[in-house]
Image: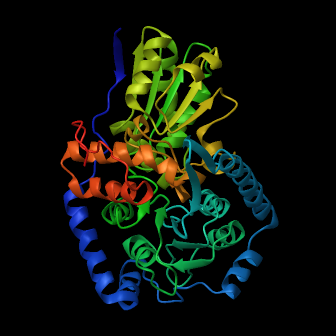
Amino acid sequence: MSSTYLKKAARTSTSDSGSVRETVQAILDEIEAGGEAAARSYAEKFDRYTGNIKVTREEIDAAAASLPQKLKDDIRFAHDNVRKFAEAQKKTLTDIEIEIVPGLVAGQKTIPIEAAGCYVPGGRYSHVASAIMTVTTAKVAGCRHITVCSPPRPEVGVHPAILYTADICGADTILAMGGVQGVASMAFGLFDVPSAGILVGPGNQFVAEAKRILFGRVGIDMFAGPTDSLILADRHADPEIVAADLVGQAEHGYNSPVWLVTDDRELAETVMELVPRHIATLPDLNRDNAEAAWRDFAEIILCDSREEMAATSDDYAPEHLTVQAADLDWWLGRLGCYGSLFLGEETTVAFGDKASGPNHVLPTSGAARYTGGLSVHKFMKIVTWQRATRDGARPIAEATARISRLEGMEGHARTADIRLRKYFPGENFDLSGTGQDI
């Protein structure tokens, strides 16, 4: 197999993790020590906001009243789709009970995490869809309290559409606070919210680093890097649509990689001509992001066969993977490393980002090699239990005693011994594994 780079990335999407980590750690430490006062201070400094931190019902109602009905209908449509998909996911997790050996019964039980914290970006873009994806999924999972934090705008507060969306999706508390201070407030249980058991949602590098540092103390959805997308296209693909889809993802940010993998040189060269034209028609900020992402991080790879295309894609393990090629069922069966898969030109990443149903919080930076995206399962603990009759405990205790002594863990072995002596007095057992009774 051989592949040719018709366009090679000039940079890789890595951040100055050292300085970011030091900055974030210092903020977290100060907020943990100083509590709400410290969090407010950072909100004033970074968000330039001095209004209510805890959004009131009156503010939520006013936000809803300010929105066009068509927008509210669209938000509810997207919410319904995400909810339906999450409910279907939840049905795949069931409590089970099985008799392992006669007299020993074990089981699995699913328990929702008590409190979830959802971060909804609201700076450069107002990510209504992130509220839909995170809050709805936590609600379906059964979390008893869902806190949302979102960056407020000076003298304005959280964007009205985010307030409306978070509310209808099931948020119990909304905090007008962004950045590290917002993440810290949810994790540490400030402003009268319960400490979050899990933190989810996208954010900038400071938000991502705060979640990384807090992981272990709380759960998180995943370690997030810049969003990335890969398109697999053959000669059947429409180059205009391929170009538009690449640009649509490149506008996320200056360091958002987009990749085209194809076995058709003509398609590749046409797309390379079309992308700059599509970028040139974007609004200013979006254009700047897309230009930088295309210039510095985009790649176009020419392969000899569809098998080589698939292998290349699996090696990249993209967050978003689109197939615009013949024989979609073959691709569905063959591909194995991606966050979410979009089969055929009739669907696109933007559909998944906004309204189609499957979650858009997905693994980046190659993490799709070992994990999937946000789902109901992330908000639920799968725990196990067991109980036994005395007869059922007998063979388990004998094996436990012998294995424990082989490992040199005498205390473990004796917890088995004591039960055998109590339940079966006067009987002899080989609990050493040497044939000698103990």
Image height of 125 relative to 175, above or below: above
**Residue at 38% across / 84% down in the picture?**
39
- Kindly give the residue lying farthest to the front in the view shown: 426
Q: Is residue 346 left or right of residue 266?
A: right
**Colouring rule applied to residues:** rainbow
Observer-nearest of 295 and 320: 320
Q: Is residue 253 visible?
A: yes
Q: Please provide percent x and percent y for residue 234.
A: 55, 15
**Residue at 70% across / 30% down in the picture?**
346
Observer-nearest of 166 and 192: 192
Picture quadrant where residue 313 is located: top left
Q: Please provide percent x and percent y for residue 265.
A: 46, 12
Image height of 84 relative to 120, above or below: above
Q: Is residue 354 left or right of residue 211?
A: right
- Kindly give the residue lying farthest to the bottom in the view shown: 37
Q: Is residue 411 left or right of residue 416?
A: left
Observer-nearest of 348 and 94: 94
Picture quadrant where residue 420 is located: bottom left
Image height of 385 relative to 154, above or below: above
Number of callouts? 0
Q: Is residue 264 visible?
A: no
Q: Please provide percent x and percent y for residue 123.
A: 48, 67
Observer-nearest of 94 and 310: 94
The N terminus sits in image quarter: top left
